[in-house]
Amino acid sequence: MSSDNIAHHKQFKYCTTRLQYRQGRELKAVKVYTVANESLHLLCFGVPKINLHNELKHSFRRFGELCHVRNVTQELLDQGAELEAFTEVFWIKFKKIFNARKAKKFLDAKEFYGGILHISYAPEYETVEELREKLNHRMAEVQYRLKVNDKQCKMMKTEENGEDK
């Protein structure tokens, strides 16, 4: 992994220029994810360096079954990543992508033993087979949604035609 692959893990500043009605209750960093960006693999930055491996594992296990949790701090430092002092980085892999999405949503920017977690997707850890499976799964989801939407559209048209008579 080169330093270019690490760049997408940098944390964005919160967006303060959104219109008031679109702002929501909490400030958010606006970032768009494509199917290829989302991943079963997460990198968790900002974990205090006080041997919290089991506690972190327990926190992530609440969102679904894990494949593994591994400390990758030294690997990232060797690749030239700039990390916050006295913190560690963990690589977490979930069995299902839905669980990874949920964990990212609920744990990103949350306090954890005195540190603020930053969680990002890590598609660079995916194998070709995992990527293929992810894209096939997404294609099946889209086909299913199209079928459901088509049925709803047909039902609405029949209801409109029935009311006109």
Image (cartoon, helix red, strand yellow):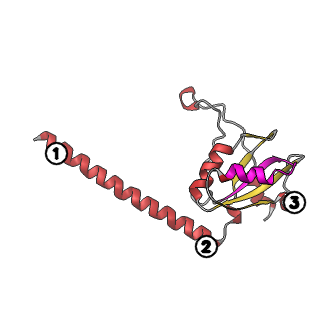
Q: What segment is highlighted magenta in the picture?
A: 41-60
Return the residue at label 2: 129
Badge number at residue 70? none
In the displayed structure, 10 sits above or below 134; it is above
Q: Nearer the viewer, residue 98 or 159?
A: 98
Residue position marked by numbered label 1 in the rendering: 161
Give coordinates of residue 27: x percent, y percent.
65, 33
Taking the view exactly as shown, the residue that stands out farthest to the bottom is: 129
Q: Amino acid at mark 1?
A: Asn
Residue 34 shows up from this direction: no
Tell me how far mark 1 sits from mark 2, CA to CA.
48 Å
What amino acid is found at the position of numbered circle 2 in the picture? Glu
In the figure, residue 161 lies in which quadrant? Answer: top left
**Pointers 1 and 3 in contact (C-beta within 8 Å):** no
Disc number lying in front (1 or 2): 2
What secondary structure is found at the residue carrying circle 1? helix
Residue 158 in magenta stretch = no
Q: Position of residue 36 (x, y in %)?
A: 60, 60
Direction from residue 97 to residue 161 in the image, left or right: left
Question: Could you tell me if the residues under marks 1 and 2 are in contact, i.e. CB atoms within 8 Å?
Answer: no
Q: Quadrant of residue 145?
A: bottom left
According to the picture, the residue beneath numbered tag 3 turns out to be 74
How far apart in space, not on screen, are marks 2 and 3 (Cα)? 27 Å
Image quadrant holding the N terminus, namely bottom right
Q: Pick the quarter of the image with the C terminus.
A: top left
Q: Residue at x 82, y 50 (%)?
A: 52
Mark 1 vs mark 3, CA separation in Å: 66 Å
Foreground residue among 160 and 17:
160
